[in-house]
Image (cartoon, rainbow, N blue to C red):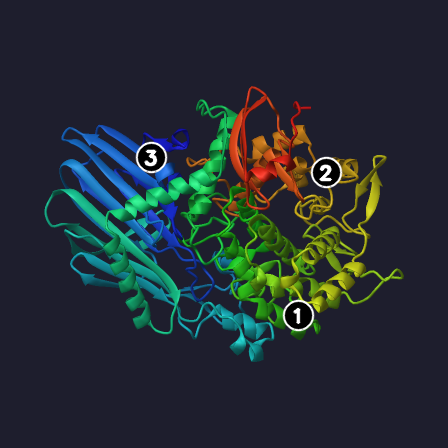
Amino acid sequence: MQDYHLKWHTQSMHSAESMPLGGHNIGCNVWVEHSELLLYFQQSGCFDENGSMLKGGRLRIAVEPDPFQDGFLQELVLEDGCIVVEGRSDQGSARILLWVDALLPVIHLDLSAEYSLALRLQYETWRDEDRRVDNQSYELFQCKEVWGDPDKPVIFHRDQVEVTGADELLFYHRNLDDDLSFDREMDTQGLREHKITLYNPQRGRTTGGLLQAPGMRFTGTTRGVYADTGYLAYGFESVAPSSQQSIVIYLLTEQVSSLAQWRKDLATLVDTSEASGQVAFDNTRAWWRAYWAKSFIHIWPDHADADDPFWQIGRNYQLFRYLLGCNYAGVWPTKFNGGLFTFDPILAGRSPWSDIELHYTPDFRLWGGGSHTAQNQRLLYWPMLKSGDFAPMRQHFDFYNRSLATAQMRAMVFFGVDGAVYPEQVGIYGLCPTCDHGWGNETGLPVPQIRYHFSTQLEVALMILDYFEYTGEDVSQYVEFMDSAVKFYDGFYARDDDQGRMVIEPGNALETFHPVRNPVDAVAGLDCVLRRLLRLPAVYASPEQRRNWLRILGRVPALSFREKDGRKIIAYAETASPLHNCEVPELYTVFPFGQFGLSKPDLQIAIDTARLAPESDDQLAHISWHQQGIQYARLGMLPEAMEFLLRKLSNAELRTPVFWGPGHDWTPDHNWGGSGMIQLQEMLLQAEGDRIYLFPCWDKKIDVWFRLWAPQNTVVECRLKGGIVEHLTVTPQERLPYLEVLLDDWR
């Protein structure tokens, strides 16, 4: 792992040149600019009244005399999950250790030096007063739930900041219950009478924390501007110069009935953290070392050549897994559009959807903070199967399960259907953000791009079923969700054709082709999920449920095919449509729904589909959520897979090489990294039923050492060197006979 550390020997110019730091459910951007250390911090689940995802604030630390006069190093120490900033001056060396407790939501900054230093510390907030925003402003892309509201102004409400002691600062944002996007959306979508019984994650949500800087004293407030945003700074300074200084930030986000309860819970967190003392850092180091030992992929492991593109791929895989690990203990899913590591938007790149200059606050992100684009979010959680990171996968499952009652209510109220329906753009309480649904629209059907796009709920169900096959852990709490997901199709598409098959019309083939009949993603998804549900052990479903699943399976239409350039290929639907987006829905039969693959019939049809189906160059892009590389890997298309991988996981343009973006989404673009992780895993290891396939799509000239997971709690560790498998272990050993090594030259 030492070879993969980020090491910077010069300071940064701005926040876009920041380095990631995190753990538990916290992400920080850390950089040194003009010899000042700056840090953005954000905790998972910080949703305000409008649906924005708020940062906790910005920290700024200046040290006198300047510790970086004669030398500078900033290093992300991956195996310990920390950042070290070191400097040298004519008086000696100085060192700042930054780390996030892996077991508690607490940020630590520990400074030590060979001489006495004086510190100035600022906590900076840009939410120091209420701010009204024009309802049509592009800034509201960060909270799509209220964008375009014709009836009520949009106000970003202020935070509360209190100096609670000479060396202590309390800051928090408690949502105002009379101005929640939950109510706006429920009301305008015609669900006012139902909302009192439904899950409301905004009410009483309080987010913030306590900053402690022992040995320092509060000096007052000042104002300033960073990037585009004015801020109010709460300043502290050293009481006396010292060679040691610690700063701690305790963060707490929860839904509570009163502010007093939040304060009490925060005090408990402080007490718990203080009681852990020095052992907290030791525990954090141990947590991260166990994380890296659980699974890894190292390419060219015997040397680090930063210019070698395959070495970069291996390093970037590990680095991006670090970003995912920073929300390991979070309740809410890691966001596809920046995760916990967004920074000043004017520095993040241009929006692909507008020419407007993004002169907005650090809270801004394209595609919103409280809205989760399902097609994108999934790509952060599929790679966790093979990396063995099973615990955080439940973030994704629980996100849907928490709003199951809302999804079931929507299906019944809007369509009179028994089942559950989730929109492709789905908010934290289960509704489609109204800027996509339409203000005053009470039909339950959003804009055409996603109007009949329901297949992602099938994909979530499949991920749960795969999770069960990998871990064997109890998934009974998700059976109602999976059952409701397939029952919706059965009720919504009640009409049969002359063969007794469901007519899925009107339908969307993802966002790319619509309206169409029998879109391929819905057909493949229903067939796959229903067959997998029927394989569940008897304890998970009643005989009546199984009979119903079997009945619905009998209604699923067959896949459609067409001919192109003299080849039979998979069709995106039975009927034709103009091209509206740049996905390749035909290949959803390969990933995620697995109708075609290396060990399955009609492989050539799928390969020809991958080569011939795309109708535009945009469909062949590698940015953001584009996933053809995964499908190439599953089909054994080695040249195409290698070429795509080199584009997908090569270095980003920013200083942190896994801060890709903005692509279609935002910077850093997490579904860009997630889709790249999945592809690399699938090139090295695939599984089908009891079988495990090693190197199903890998050039044997490329040395690689990896440890990945397979179904039935199986761990495969392998080292390929010089085209020879030097080391191979399968745990448990009784799974070894089910493993087959597939190696081929780059064809």
Q: Position of residue 317 (x, y in %)?
A: 50, 36
Decide: few, some or many residues near mark 2? Use Cα within 10 Å; few <14, some 14-19, many ≥20. few
Name the residue that disc number 2 marks.
599
Inspect the image, locate mark 2, and give the three-letter code of the amino acid beneath it: Ser
What residue sits 49% from the left and 72% below the top? Answer: 152
> Image quadrant of residue 542?
bottom right
Q: CA distance from mark 2 to mark 1?
A: 38 Å
What residue sits 55% from the left and 40% below the top? Answer: 732
Q: CA distance from mark 3 to mark 1?
A: 51 Å
Disc number placed over residue 411 in the picture, else none: 1
**Left or right of 545, for residue 243:** left
Query: The C terminus lies in which quarter of the figure?
Result: top right
Give SS at disc 3.
strand
> Image quadrant of residue 546?
bottom right
Front one among 530 and 362: 530
Give SS at disc 1.
helix
Depth check, mark 2 against mark 3: the one in front is 2
Name the residue that disc number 3 marks.
75
Inspect the image, locate mark 1, and give the three-letter code of the amino acid beneath it: Ala
Do we see residue 209 in this rendering?
yes
Inspect the image, locate mark 3, and give the three-letter code of the amino acid beneath it: Glu
Compare marks 2 and 3 and give the one earlier in the sequence.
Answer: 3
Disc number placed over residue 660 in the picture, else none: none
Decide: few, some or many residues near mark 3? Use Cα within 10 Å; few <14, some 14-19, many ≥20. some
Give SS at disc 2.
loop
